[in-house]
Amino acid sequence: MIETGEILQTMRMIQEENFDIRTITLGINLLDCSDQNPQRCAQRVYDKICDKARNLVRTGEEIETEFGIPIVHKRISVTPVSLICQGDPKPIAKALNKAAEDVGVNFLGGYSALMHKGSTLADERLLASIPEVLSETELLCASVNVASTRSGINMNAVREMGEIIRETAMLTAESDGLGCAKLVVFANAVEDNPFMAGAFCGIGEPECAINVGVSGPGVVKVALESVRGQPFDVLAETIKRTAFKITRVGQLVAREASQRLKIPFGIVDLSLAPTPARGDSVAHILTEMGLEMAGAPGTTAALALLNDAVKKGGVMASNHVGGLSGAFIPVSEDIGMIEATAAGALTLEKLEAMTCVCSVGLDMIAIPGDTSAATISGIIADEAAIGVINQKTTAVRVIPAIGKKAGDRVEFGGLLGFAPVMPVNTMNNDAFIARGGRIPAPLHSLRN
Amino acid sequence: MYFYVQGEFGMTKALISVTGLDATGIIACVAGKLSEMNINILDISQTILGGYFTMLMVVDLDGAGMSFEEIDQHLQPVRDRLKMTIHMQRMDIFDAMHRI
């Protein structure tokens, strides 16, 4: 029996509190598309994606209509391209983008390389092609894993990524460096993440899998309004209850999509993913807890509580939880984070601390256009160190805003939002980054 | 007021919510259309909140022999005539969210 009040609560969550399913992401294995001839490989990739994903968007829309829950994005993640390309990866990039356009998805992720321990020839070729590929394609997302708790930090890859991010920003300067919004550098990347820009279909994944990412920071914020002034125990409990409800809908959508597409269900990712819309902000959950703005002393503790409670509530609601699962803290995609940055309440250093307890890392942060490649590499190395030592996923998605300085504004549009350019510590680190090599894996990597 | 979700095996249940300014004959009009499509009404609750008519109906769609989308399209003339918001969604979402 469902009570009228419960029905109205669900309807209010969807209509007024911006509750939605952020994405149904179809993971597709492309290992069998590899070919010595890049053109032939590209054709196989295109054909396979179009075959496997032909009903994805239509099915997503049907579920959306029938259940009355918005499914904002339909996406595809594929096997890291460096694993299938035996020559020039650019034809594959074009084929991926074309396939994404033709099946009608919003993004396709997997123009990726896993080089946490070292690089292959294919990894190097893929890395070199990233700036050009991201400037010439619209829907393709790239990611590079440069570190893991098991293998340490590949500092050669870290150095290269600093340069590649700068180059990508230069090539897409006209669109405020949009190419860099589609490029993420990971430590401990996960294989079943449905969120962009870092989604790829890991090598341990099945032939195809449906992974669903939920959202709903607005719902959590509204729920917390009813427990103002109450102790943290009550706060945590309220978040857990809300996360449970949100995730149950994610599970329902995943099950439905899996049944209709006849593709196995992979995971539900419990992440609270914000958008630039008012009422859809993770930062505003933190302010609801009693902070004037995100960045105020106490922010890291607030985020830690939120991240943990979301997992505890969500994990009971789905039979397989995975992906990144936690609270995202992107800057340009969250109106509360944008406001805090503009007011000077939130700095890059505070964000770095927050990434120790959030689900991922430094995300969608616009930095001054004259930031050196070595400085960007330093930011990546710091973030990777946090991930490696704490056995969590961390990432860097920074956007050098070419021709702009701290305080100027960049605009990406849509879910990617807009942001004030954030100042960066400019102390020289060239000699540190120039060393190269590999930072050894920490002692606790030896767990056997 | 309670709505039963668990029905007979295979039953496709949906919630139809009707909201808007109160007028005469709203229930008759909606129920008439449902009957025309052979859609059985399982449960119904109706109230006036601040001059706004709010009705929640649980229905079984299986009798209609039409797709969800087609049924929804058939409700369009009712929306136009009554000038009310009529929203139909599968009952499963409420069950998923509020029941373990």
Image (cartoon, rainbow, N blue to C red):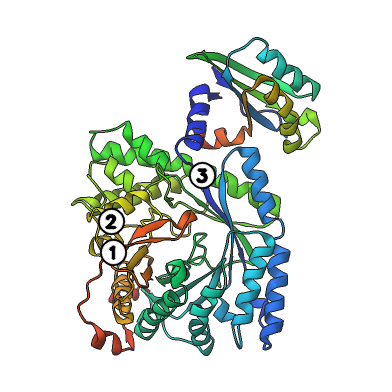
Q: Which chain does the residue under circle 3 lie in?
A: A
- Per the rendering, the mark at residue A422 is 1
Disc 1, disc 2: CB below 8 Å?
Answer: yes
Q: Residue at x 48, y 54 (%)?
A: A415
Is residue A15 visible to us here? yes
Q: Give the answer, above or below, for where A255 lies relative to A96.
A: above
Is residue A332 visible to us here? no
Q: Nearer the viewer, residue A260 or A171?
A: A171
Q: Residue B20 falls in which quadrant of the image? A: top right
Q: Which secondary structure, mark 2?
A: helix
Instruction: State how far apart marks 1 and 2 are (Cα).
Output: 7 Å
Question: Nearer the viewer's eye, disc 1 or disc 3?
Answer: 1
Q: Which chain does the residue under circle 2 lie in?
A: A
Residue A437 at x, y percent in the picture: 33, 89
Q: Nearer the viewer, residue B93 or B48?
A: B48
Q: Residues within 10 Å of mark 3 (few under 14, many from 20)?
A: many
For marks 1 and 3, the one nearer the N-term is: 3
- Per the rendering, the mark at residue A20 is 3
> To which residue does mark 2 refer?
A341
Instruction: State how far apart marks 1 and 3 are (Cα).
Output: 30 Å
Q: Give the answer, above or below, for where A141 lies relative to A37.
A: above
Residue A114 at x, y percent in the picture: 48, 78
Q: Amino acid at mark 1?
A: Met
Q: Give the answer, above or below, for where A280 lies relative to A199.
A: above
Q: Residue B92 falls in which quadrant of the image? A: top right
Q: Nearer the viewer, residue A231 or A218?
A: A218
For marks 2 and 3, the one nearer the N-term is: 3
Q: Amino acid at mark 2?
A: Thr
